[in-house]
Image (cartoon, rainbow, N blue to C red):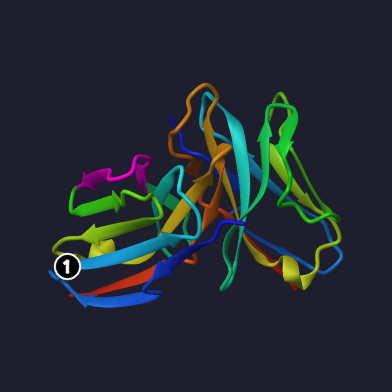
Amino acid sequence: SQELEQSPQSLIVQEGKNLTINCTSSKTLYGLYWYKQKYGEGLIFLMMLQKGGEEKSHEKITAKLDEKKQQSSLHITASQPSHAGIYLCGAANAGNNRKLIWGLGTSLAVNP
Amino acid sequence: NAGVMQNPRHLVRRRGQEARLRCSPMKGHSHVYWYRQLPEEGLKFMVYLQKENIIDESGMPKERFSAEFPKEGPSILRIQQVVRGDSAAYFCASSPQATRNTEAFFGQGTRLTVV
């Protein structure tokens, strides 16, 4: 079965610093989703990537899917306290884009 | 357009009681997914439903758990005779019927505590 590994597990950065979170799959990714979760709350959709080499940006967050479609990275530029939370990557298997498997998450803290 | 609504947000049950978790999908969405988030284990798929049909229940425990999505009303995740190991956050997500390759919209979750 497919597994997703996220790294690092946790991250503490100073406000204004850049950071990168990685999501590595044991199998080819057919759809890769990035979500953010605040403690005790639901998941907020960030981005979805499907094509090898695809890159998307939203405000100061950029996500990429590598050419081989087995790894994705999430990059935050000039981090702010509002970026703090748990970042989750979810992957769709070949047959169903809806039944997602998930990484364990990366917990991000941004110190002002 | 209201988002995915889950209720209650917090639910406390004694061992042996029943828990009923409700999920109202976004307007126009007829696909509903339930996920469970256990401490230190991440999100796990439980069941995928469309109106009046269970499409994939491969993630549901064999006993005590059931789900439905009736023609009218919210989707219900029902846990009978709860045990402490059922304590978790349960999330519901919905997506549009005819659209592929879109994000799933998540509710705020129901946090079940079994005492």
Is A15 displayed left or right of B102 in the figure? left
The image shows residue A4 at horizontal and vertical percentages of 49, 61
Q: Can residue B74 be seen in this view?
A: no
Give the chain letter at badge 1: A
In the picture of the structure, the residue carrying the numbered disc 1 is: A18
Which region of the structure is painted magenta?
Answer: A46-58
Q: Quadrant of residue B17?
A: bottom right
In the rendered view, would you say B95 is above or below B65?
above
In the rendered view, would you say A17 is above or below A46?
below
Is B68 displayed left or right of A24 in the figure? right
Q: Quadrant of residue A37?
A: bottom left
Give the amino acid type for the residue marked by disc 1 in the picture: Asn
SS label for mark 1: loop
- At 51% from the left and 57% from the top, the residue drawn is A102
Residue count near mark 1 (Cα–Cα under 10 Å), binned few <14, some 14–19, many ≥20:
some
In the rendered view, would you say A22 is above or below B91?
below
The image shows residue B89 at horizontal and vertical percentages of 60, 61
Quarter containing the C terminus of chain B: bottom right
Is A39 displayed left or right of B13 in the figure? left
Residue placed most toward the observer, A93 or B64: A93
Quarter containing the N terminus of chain B: top left
The image shows residue A22 at horizontal and vertical percentages of 34, 64
Magenta stretch, overall SS: strand
